[in-house]
Amino acid sequence: MWRRYGDALYTLVTFAIFGFETLALGALSISFLLGKAAGIASTPVEEILFAVVTSTASALALLGLYLLTYHFTSAMRDRWQAERLDTWTEKWIGLALETDPAGGSGDVTFTNRLSQPAIEAVLSLLEAVKGEEGDRLKEALIDHHVDRAFLRRLQTGHLAARLDAIERLGKARLPVAVEPLLELVGHPKAVVRRMAIRAAAGTLATMTPEAELDEPSRRFIQTLKGSALQAGVIQEALLLLETRAPGVLRGLLAEPDLPDALLWVVLETIGRLGLADMAVEVALSTTHQDPELRAAAFRALRRLGLVPDQSQLPLLAALTDEVDFVRVQAAHTATFLPAEKALRALWPLLEDESWWVRRAAAGSMAAHGEDGVAALTRAAKTHADQGARDMAVQILLEAGVLDAAAARQFKGVA
Amino acid sequence: MMQTPQSTDARILVVDDERVNVVLLERILQQAGYTNIKSTTDSTQAAALYDEFEPDLIMLDLHMPGLDGFAVMEQLDGRIKDDDFLPILILTADIRPEIKRRALSAGAKDFVTKPFDRTEVLLRIQNLLETRYLYLRFDRQGVREGQAT
């Protein structure tokens, strides 16, 4: 009913309680009846009591019977549905792997109108398999007009039905659904927009692109540009594009009037996907007027693990950026500059007013190997600023270069 | 001459909480000629099945309720001998590099992204099994040479 576990125990306890109560009240009713027959219980009060006891016993008996019947029938129904689902799963697998292409044998047959278990089974399979096998299943869905039924439900005014249709289309990944799904990204309800873009992205991921930026990708880009989707939702959709993601991300970066919020998501996604061949495009944003975007560009470069030549000067300049979180990201990214250049530029940041910048600078220095560790050790001993010396010691301790006793000595605590 | 086992004789253990995925993989493997397949949708059984079945390859889902793929690999880590090469092929819909890095450092050898392509799955299995058999062959050869000397 509303529990997932302990059904048998719940039924047993409920049955025991109701059974006990029913038996007790039943016995009481019989004794009242016998007393009445013998003329013992004859007052109106006793008759009312008798009626109350009898009706309560009957109600409990009925309720107990209902609960037992409910559990029995729902268990039977669940088992029947699971069996149907298993049978259909086997059937669809046979079709997908071409071991049972005719689809006419067994307990179930491919009729014109597919049952719910048949649809559930094929949708689950489409989440697991792609390629030729997936295409065979999609063809079967289209042959049985399931796509039309889903697309019709997309247009319904009932929110739950519409969400259900979006979810099913997302699982089915039918190319024909991309356009209607993208149209729903302009829907006033956020939940519809979110589900629609996810379903569209998942579908696009299974479609072999005709070119790096084909028409469906271009349509996806324009939809994102004009949408009111949150950054996290857009990023998720871009990640769902899988192998199609680089083309779409490159297309977005090439858009002349890309909103800043969308550019930020693009930079984050490039970094998260580790698309190193897009480092040059990312580098263009390292000098953006918006500090959030400068920081995002440096963060992306750090995730890509490289700094293109043309970004070295902007990176060095960003180490003295007026905004502290830009300096933090620039300091982290300086890990990928040539050691000599990086160490010279990072040294002054050890006495930055921001603790985060000092930490990022020291961490970045330590990442430069022996030269970095030597520079940090020198900073720990000789830097004029107490905060710089402390941070250098802390990073050397965390890197395992110093032990706790040595770190205390450096700090003059011991 | 040391006999190299046929890869279709390989013992393959499939661990995935989605029954559909398990059945699909079983059928794909059977169709490709693999006969020694065991599977479970209950990840808590993975370690016990490993002990009992001694698989040549494990196909493991990463995101499972209760014990996830990382926890299963942690459990197996204590069971797999240091000098053994047991390929673990990860089945995942999560393509993020950090997840892949984490899985690789936990003992995974290769990945198949869901929804998966049948040909790709079979090729990856074949490659991993070949590596395992080569490893076993050199291992046995080493033992034999050690005994001879």
Image (cartoon, coloured by chain):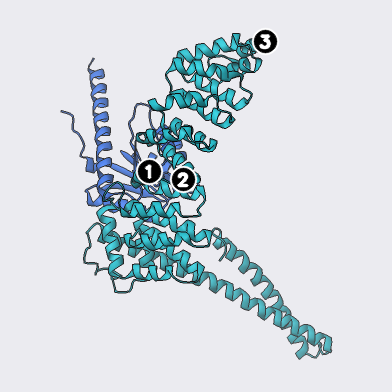
Chain colours: A cyan, B blue
Q: Which residue is mark 3?
A: A412
For disc 2, the marked residue is B44
The C terminus of chain A: image quadrant: top right
Task: Give me the disc on residue A254.
Answer: 1
Q: In the image, what residue type sits under mark 2?
A: Thr
Query: Looking at the image, do the residues carrying marks 1 and 3 touch, with CB atoms under 8 Å apart?
Result: no
Q: Is residue B43 left or right of residue A51?
A: left
Residue A234 image offset from top left, x and y in percent: 46, 49
Q: Alpha-carbon neighbours of circle 2 within 10 Å: few (<14), some, or many (≥20)?
A: some
Left or right: residue A236 versus residue A141 is right
Q: CA distance from mark 1 to mark 3?
A: 55 Å
User: Amino acid type of disc 1?
Assistant: Ala
Q: Is residue A201 visible?
A: no
Which residue shows up at 55% across the image and 62% down it? Answer: A7
Q: Chain of mark 2?
A: B
Task: Specify the subunit that label 3 lies on.
Answer: A
Quadrant of the drawing holding the N terminus of chain A? bottom right
Which mark's residue is nearer the viewer, 1 or 2? 1
The residue sitting at 50% across, 70% down in the picture is A74
Badge 1 element: helix
Task: Give the SS element for disc 2.
Answer: helix
Specify the amino acid type for callout 3. Answer: Gly
What is the CA distance from the residue labelled 1 to the residue labelled 2? Answer: 49 Å
